[in-house]
Structure formats: C-alpha cells, structure tokens
Amino acid sequence: MSDKLSIVIVDDNEIDLMIGERLLSRVDQSIALTKFNHSTEMLNWLQREDENSFTTNTIFLVDIYMPIFNGYYVAEQITQVFDAFDKKAIIYLVSATIEISDNRKLMLNSRVEGYIGKPVTVSLFKELIKKHG
Amino acid sequence: MIDFKQEQDGAVLYVDDEQNNINSFRSTFRKEFKVYSAINAVEALKNLKSYPDIKVIISDQRMPDVTGVEFFEKIRHIYPNKVRVILTGYSDIKAVIDAINKGQVYRYIDKPWNNDLVRLAIQDAMDLFDTRKNLSDKNESLQSAYNELDKFVYSVSHDLRSPLMSILGIANLAEVDVQDPKSLEYFQTIKGMVDKLDGYIHQIIDHYKGSQGKQFGDRIDFNKVVDEIIESIKYHPSAQGVKFQVNLEQSDSFLSNKMNVKTILSNLISNAFKYQREEETNKFVEVTGTITSEKAEIIVKDNGVGIKEDKKEEVFNMFYRAKQDETGTGLGLFIVSEAIEKLAGSIDLRSTFGKGTEIKLILPGTSE
C-alpha cells in the first residue's frame, strides 16, 4: 500500500463507483480506495477518522449531484476537516453534466483542484497518480 | 362610501376636494361603474389600500393639500398598473401637459366635464388597465414556461447524460478487461453509439443556448474562436490526415453573439472534416476571411464529397443527413441556419459533387 496517496470516491451512482474502483485497480493496485454510495455515510466517516487515518495526499472524487448533501457541501466539509490536519486533501468535483455553470462555486473552495467530466477513465487515474502520487 | 357594482368589472376612484363634485360624479356614473370617492389624498390612499378592484383613478388637479399631478406622482410607483386621469380647468393645463408627457397621467378631462367624454375616458382607461394586466399575466406565464424549459434542459444535460456516461464507463472498463477480439469489437460499437447519442445531447443544448442568446455585444476574435474549435476536434478520427489552413484577417474588434458565432463555425468546420473523400490523397480544409467591425466574411472550403445539386436546399433542414453511414444527427446545419438568422447574416453554399464544398458566411457586426 502506498503511504503517500489514497483515493476516496463518493457517488450515489453505484455503477460509476464500480467503474472507478475497477479502473483504478487496473492502473495501480497499491493505492487504497475508499468508496461511498451516500454522501451522509461519507460525512459520518470523515468526522470519525483522525489525521493518522489518511495518507500524505488524499484525492477525493466527489460527485456533484447527490441526494441529501451535494458535492459542493461535501467538498466544504472535507476542507474544514483537513484545515486542522497536516495532510493534504485534493478535491475533484465529478459530474456527467455538459457544462458547469457553477464555475464560480468551484473556485470558492481552494482545495477543489478542478472539475472532472464523467466517465472516469484509465488515463484520468494515470494522470492523477502522476500529479499527486 | 360604495355604490353597488353595475356592469363594469373593476372600479373607479374619484378624488376631489369639493363634496358637490363628488356627489355629482357619483350620481352620474354609479349606474355604469363601481365608484369609490375620496375628499383628499390621504383618504384616496386609504381607499386604494382597501379596494384592490380600483382600476382607474380620476383626480381633480386643484386640491388644497397636494395637486392631482403631485398625488399621481406619489402613487405611480406603488400602484403602477392603475390608470390615472386628471380633471382640470384650462388655467392648470401646462402642469397637466407636462405630467402627461412624463407618463404620470394617461389622459385629462376638462372642467366642467362632459358626461360622455368622461364615460369614454373611464372606458378607455379600464380597457388599458385590462390590456396591461393581460400582458403582465402573459409575461408571467411565459417566464414560468421559460423556467420549466431551463429545468428540462438541465435534466437533458444531466439526467439523460448520466446513465449514458455510465454505459461509456462500462465499455471503457470492458476494453481494459476483455481480450476476445469479437467482444472488443462489440464494445467499440457500443462506444460509437454512445458517442453519437452524446453528440446529439450536446447539439440540443447548443441549440437551446443559441436560441436564448440575446446578447450581441460579445467581442469576437475569430482566430481565437477557430483555434478553440480546432483544439476540440483535432483528435477526432475524421481530422486525421487532413491538412488544415486558417487565414483570417481581422482588422477591428467585431461585436456579435459569441455563442451563435461559435456554433456556426464549429458546425461548418467539423462538417468540412467529416465529409472528406476516402480516396483523396491531399485532403484539406481551409478557413479564410476578412473581418472589419461592420462585417465578417468567412469562407470554409474543403475538397471532400461535395453536395449534389438537388440536395443543396435540403441540407439546412432539420434531421436531414447526407450520408447514411455518418455519425451525424441531422441537426448541425439546421442549427447553423437558425443561428445565422438570429445574427441577421447570410450563407452561400457552393459545391460540386465529388469535388468539394465552399461555404461563404457573412455576418454583420453590431455596434457598441
């Protein structure tokens, strides 16, 4: 297992979660993946964990349009929790929507690295690992 | 002080500081209109608040506390839809004309009044009120239809696209996991179909956004727009092995609607790439033109399949497709012609079947 990089995926679409999980395992099996099908589950988990639970860099792939808590809210919560840590959270907001008219919203959160259009691909994971691994 | 409603739906408020006039007005018109009255501005305001069925306000100009015009000036922002009529003698005519010109007063009636003229003025004012009301109701329902459409477009762009992207993801995953060449071929076909459907969704959104564009003040750098288009299609299979040349001379800044201009150029350019001839060894697409602040004249030229003489009109129709085997949706040139119409431009298509196509586009620039 890599000490440096781990990935967390939050998406209410189970198929997309499965695609992400399997594609990542084809690219690099040493990277730990944590996945959540519900934003509430993910937020509960986030509150429970302490700094030691995370690798130096954690990439969060957060679906924007989720029921109960949407991606923007989840990103804010991640930011708040990591503000107290010495470790790094790298957030990408993910969506199948063609155009994100909420670009300004993306920029409001400094930990949000960018926007990823679905579907996630092998080359995306390779790029993320190269950049943050 | 209410007289019972007779025939007209909606009421008149009569404001006058002389009780005699009020009495005379009420007795003359109470059979035809529902009449409220007030002896001064304060009472008039009270009535306006209490009786929302008031459509028309008739006020005497000369009153001790405020003049009729001043009273109207005060209430026009609170009750903008109520129609205001002033009652005046000739000595006050200047102030009244001024008020009419400023839009504070709809009409004036001479004092002493002629019953028929007052009747007519009230009738006209009521009609005006109803017309305005209808218009604002229609506006409101249009606005809500528009919001519905926004929601629909959003769901097209997200809810429809979301499962489609899952299919694409699964097909991608299968391509990584599956070795059997036959299965691989199936998955590639699925991906091709997803691409096509996705292209269709993109065009629906483009069309919608294009039809919404009301801004014509975007500063457009044509070289930059063409660069962006090329950037987005250069990896597409249709662009491989095609020589691309741009020569656009833009001397001034050009103002128009950027969304529409981009839609037009991107459809024309991607068509030029798409409809190439397989056997041609020197495939090319050329974009040339001159742009001034008044006019952009752009030519998109290719040596592709060309268009048959009898199909030249048809290509701009919705859902017309030139080739059965192409991935087109039949919306491209339809969207182009709509966008051109919106920008008051023109398009001229010259093509020789089997030799190539040259499309000349002329767009007028708008002023600041």
Image (cartoon, coloured by chain):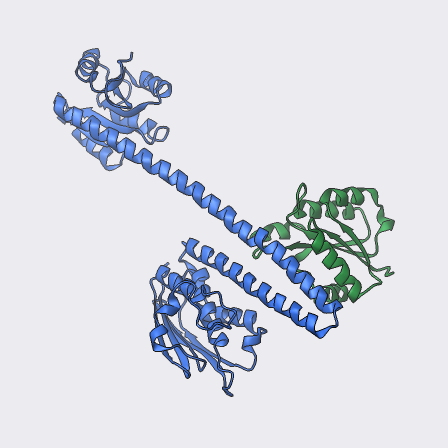
In the image, residue B62 lies at what x, y percent? 21, 21
Q: Nearer the viewer, residue A103 or A116?
A: A116
Q: Nearer the viewer, residue A74 or B250?
A: A74
In the image, residue B1 lies at what x, y percent? 29, 11
Q: Is residue B169 above or below residue B302?
A: above
Is B56 displayed left or right of B363 in the figure?
left
Q: Which color was chain A given?
A: green
Identity of the residue furthest to the bottom in this view: B281
Which chain did the renderer colour blue?
B
Quadrant location, the C terminus of chain B: bottom left
Identity of the residue furthest to the front in this view: B182
Q: Is residue B111 above or below residue B195?
A: above
- Picture mark count: 0
In the image, residue B121 lies at what x, y percent? 19, 28
Q: Nearer the viewer, residue B207 or B17?
A: B207
Q: Nearer the viewer, residue B51 or A70?
A: A70
Residue B43: quadrant of the picture: top left
Residue B343 in view in this figure: yes
Task: Tell me the residue at 48%/44% (across/down).
Answer: B148
Q: Is residue B140 above or below residue B28?
A: below
Residue B95 in view in this figure: no
